[in-house]
């Protein structure tokens, strides 16, 4: 069965460290998205990609970067982790404007 | 500026009764809407969608209503079951993009 996975599921890091969160989908979807979920803010879009080598900034992209070298993966990098980036991160993928399929999430704590 | 708003952070409903979750949007360009359900420690899962060419879409116990003039949509769950207890997000998109703007979510608790 096709799926979307995220790793790690939990991560604790220190302020200033670089962190990379992995997202892998086997749906063969062109579109991939990264969100963060925070209390009172719902799901906010960080970055998204409509295909290989395509990346776009979302509404809360400062301090984050992505790269898309193949269809299956969209890793999210925090260049220099800050306490404000403590959150739950979700990756999603979709075909055209159809519903997005979400991964199980990564809980990141920045100390 | 929150383009998609869910003004009720939480809602409690008795089992068997109707649950009504509301969502308002400000951008008149939005023409496709989704509802998601999210359990703790899991990713959101898709529930139901509606296009702006319709004003109602049904799928089993779930019905979504769209009022374009009021820029308002609602999700009705009938009858509500304890397993429906979750956080519900609405999301909106406009033509020419594949991304969605999500609301802040409503936590539904169905009481047995």
Image: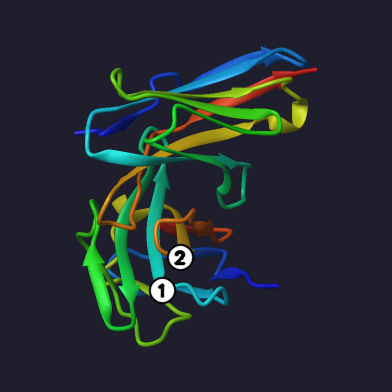
**Do the numbered discs 1 and 2 sit on residues whose CB atoms are within 8 Å?**
yes
Q: Is residue B93 above or below residue B18?
A: below
Q: Are marks 1 and 2 on the same chain?
A: yes
Q: Chain of mark 1?
A: A
Q: Is residue B59 above or below residue A67?
A: above
Q: Disc 2 designates what residue?
A: A95
Of the numbered discs in the image, which one, if any, rests on residue B60? none
Image location (x, y in percent) of residue B109: 65, 22
Q: Earlier in the sequence, mark 1 or mark 2?
A: 1
Please tell me which residue lies in front, A2 or A110.
A2
**Is B105 rendered above or below residue A28?**
above
Q: Is residue B51 visible?
A: yes
Q: Taking the image as drawn, is residue A111 in sight?
A: no
State which quarter of the image contains the C terminus of chain B: top right
Q: Residue at x 38, y 20 (%)?
A: B7
**x, y percentage for residue A77?**
33, 73
The quarter in which the N terminus of chain B is drawn is top left
Splitting the image into 4 quarters, where does residue A74 fall? bottom left
Q: Is residue A10 left or right of residue A70?
A: right
User: What residue do we see at 62% from left, 49% from top?
Assistant: B41
Regarding mark 2 in the picture, which secondary structure is present there? loop
Label at residue A30: 1
Q: Quick one: label 2, few (<14), some, or many (20+) residues within 10 Å?
A: some
Q: Residue at x 37, y 35 (%)?
A: B52
Query: Which residue is nearer to you in this view: B60 or A35?
Result: B60
């Amino acid at each position: 069965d096709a799926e979307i996975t995220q790793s790690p599921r939990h991560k604790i890091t220190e302020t200033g460290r670089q962190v990379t969160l992995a997202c892998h989908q086997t749906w063969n979807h062109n579109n991939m998205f990264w969100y963060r979920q925070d209390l009172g803010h719902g799901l906010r879009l960080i970055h998204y990609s409509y295909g290989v080598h395509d990346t776009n900034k979302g509404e809360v992209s400062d301090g984050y970067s992505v790269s898309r070298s193949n269809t299956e993966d969209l890793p999210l990098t925090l260049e220099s982790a800050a306490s404000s980036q403590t959150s739950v991160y979700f990756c999603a993928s979709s075909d055209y404007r159809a519903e997005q399929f979400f991964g199980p999430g990564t809980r990141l704590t920045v100390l | 500026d929150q383009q998609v708003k869910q003004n009720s952070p939480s809602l409690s409903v008795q089992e068997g009764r109707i649950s009504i979750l509301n969502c308002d949007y400000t951008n008149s360009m939005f023409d496709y809407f989704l509802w998601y359900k999210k359990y703790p420690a899991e990713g959101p899962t898709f529930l139901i969608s509606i296009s702006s060419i319709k004003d109602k879409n049904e799928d089993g116990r779930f019905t979504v209503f769209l009022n374009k003039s009021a820029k308002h949509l609602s999700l009705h769950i009938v009858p509500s079951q304890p397993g429906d207890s979750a956080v519900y997000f609405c999301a909106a998109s406009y033509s020419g993009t594949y991304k969605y703007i999500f609301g802040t979510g409503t936590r539904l608790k169905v009481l047995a």
